């Protein structure tokens, strides 16, 4: 069992920035990849970004490319999501997820094994 805990959400004005953190109970070097997803009210959960075990490869949704940056610090078992130039449409609950087995970056929620409880991000206009 791997525990995943997100933090860093909050209320920010459009154009502002937030940094989300995700700490895992397992050594992140034992995890193939980590991903961030989000879910707005009445919408399905959608992929945001993913990072490989080494941190050398990343994958982003088109909607956040150029504004969000995912990174990981394996020494701290932590993954980060730096969110800049936030827009009201970025408002959602953000979830961190760990993929233990699939050796590739994936935007598919079904390929992630463990999920956090989510952290709310609200962007006001």
Image (cartoon, rainbow, N blue to C red):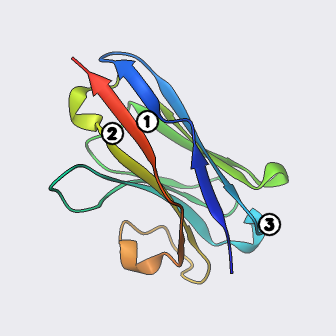
Alpha-carbon distance for marks 2 and 1?
6 Å
Residue 77 figure quarter: bottom right
**Badge 2: residue crowd in 10 Å (few <14, some 14–19, many ≥20):** some
Mark seen at residue 52: none
Measured as percent of width and height from the top left, residue 8 is found at 56, 36
**Badge 1: residue crowd in 10 Å (few <14, some 14–19, many ≥20):** many
- Which element carries disc 2, helix, strand or loop? loop
Question: Do the residues under discs 3 and 1 have CB atoms within 8 angstroms?
Answer: no
- Label 2, on which residue? 64
Alpha-carbon distance for marks 3 and 1?
24 Å
Answer with mark 3 or mark 1, whichever residue precedes in sequence: 3
Instruction: Please give left or right for residue 29 compared with residue 91 in the image.
Output: right
Question: Do the residues under discs 3 and 2 have CB atoms within 8 angstroms?
Answer: no
Residue plotted at (33% across, 31% down): 122
- Label 1, on which residue? 68
Question: Do the residues under discs 2 and 1 have CB atoms within 8 angstroms?
Answer: yes
Q: Is residue 8 above or below residue 71?
A: above
Residue plotted at (21% across, 17% down): 125
- Which element carries disc 3, helix, strand or loop? loop
Answer with mark 3 or mark 2, whichever residue precedes in sequence: 3
Residue 110 figure quarter: bottom left
- Label 3, on which residue? 27
Residue 3 vs residue 84, the one in the foreground: 3
Residue 33 vs residue 112, the one in the foreground: 112
Alpha-carbon distance for marks 3 and 2?
27 Å
Residue plotted at (31% across, 26% down): 123
């Amino acid at each position: 069992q791997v525990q995943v805990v997100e933090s860093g959400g909050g209320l920010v004005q459009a154009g502002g920035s937030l940094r989300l953190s995700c700490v895992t109970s397992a050594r992140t070097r034992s995890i193939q990849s980590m991903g961030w997803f989000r879910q707005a009210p009445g919408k399905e959960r959608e992929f945001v970004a993913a990072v490989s075990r080494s941190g050398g490869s990343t994958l982003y949704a088109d909607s956040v490319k150029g504004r969000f940056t995912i990174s990981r610090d394996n020494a701290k078992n932590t993954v980060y999501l730096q969110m800049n130039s936030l827009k009201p449409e970025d408002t959602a609950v953000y979830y961190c997820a760990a993929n233990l087995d699939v050796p590739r970056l994936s935007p598919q929620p079904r390929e992630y094994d463990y999920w956090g409880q989510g952290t709310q991000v609200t962007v006001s206009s």
